Amino acid sequence: MDRAQLLLVGLPLFLLCSDLFSLFTSSPPPPKPSHHHHHHHQQPQPVINPVTTPFPSDSEKLATNIGGAGFGNTVNINFCSSCSYKGTAVTVKKMLEIAFPGIEVIPANYPPPLPKRLLSKVVPVVQIGVIGVVVAGEQIFPMLGFVAPPPWYFSLRANRFGTIATTWLLGNAVQSFLQSSGAFEVYFNGNLVFSKLKEGRFPGEIELKDLITKRMTNSRLVSSASELGL
């Protein structure tokens, strides 16, 4: 046989012999399972002794509450709404709610004194009266007992639109002045903390935080002393 025939016959015989050899040869033992994961779950857990666990003292709790917690406290911001102080009040409200979480901040309008409030109610009546006279004075004056309208009526009637516009704008300006109080008063639990009417200015952010922190500290100290019966 030539080499090609020997190769075709010898290769199957070699493969057959290798298969027979592998059948009678003992297979290697399986690998031992790793116990690393098992031991990891059985590691002893640290024991915390509840007796030796440190707890914050009363002074630390008080400092923590003063530093950020404002639960149970109320701040009232009474401002002049006709003076366009509402934006400032909203800004101060957000600042206090961030500085003292849980605190209740209530903005409200600070009314002017009673005489100014009464006069502010009269101004619209005067405005309507003047405009009515300018528009229909010829019918109104005879109803009031006048034979003829007074001379000043004809002066107003000659510049009807200018008189109406001036009356409306001037009346609104007077009414805004009478309704304005210029106030920006801050109260903490009903006690006055800052007054723009007295100081003549708005409170600073750091200044207001310090004022409320001091009041909060005093109120907590008083409540703690009352609980201890001092």
Image (cartoon, rainbow, N blue to C red):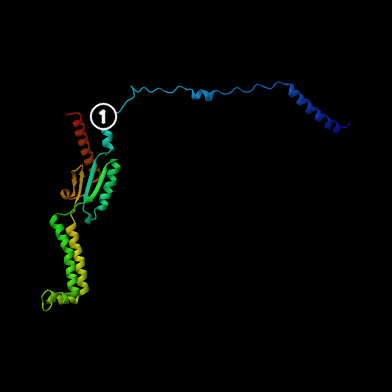
Residue 21: x and y in percent read 75, 23
**Residue visible at 17% across and 65% down in the picture:** 125
> In the figure, 139 relative to 125: above or below?
below
In the rendered structure, the answer to whether residue 31 lies left or right of residue 96 reads: right
Residue 188: x and y in percent read 21, 42
> In the figure, 84 relative to 26: above or below?
below
Q: Residue furthest bottom?
A: 148
> In the figure, 101 relative to 145: above or below?
above
In this rendered view, identify the residue nearer to me: 176 or 118.
118
The part of the image, by quadrant, that contains residue 180 is bottom left
Residue 163: x and y in percent read 19, 72
**Residue visible at 78% across and 25% down in the picture:** 17
Name which residue type carries label 1.
Asp
For the C terminus, the quadrant is top left
For the N terminus, the quadrant is top right
Residue of label 1 = 58
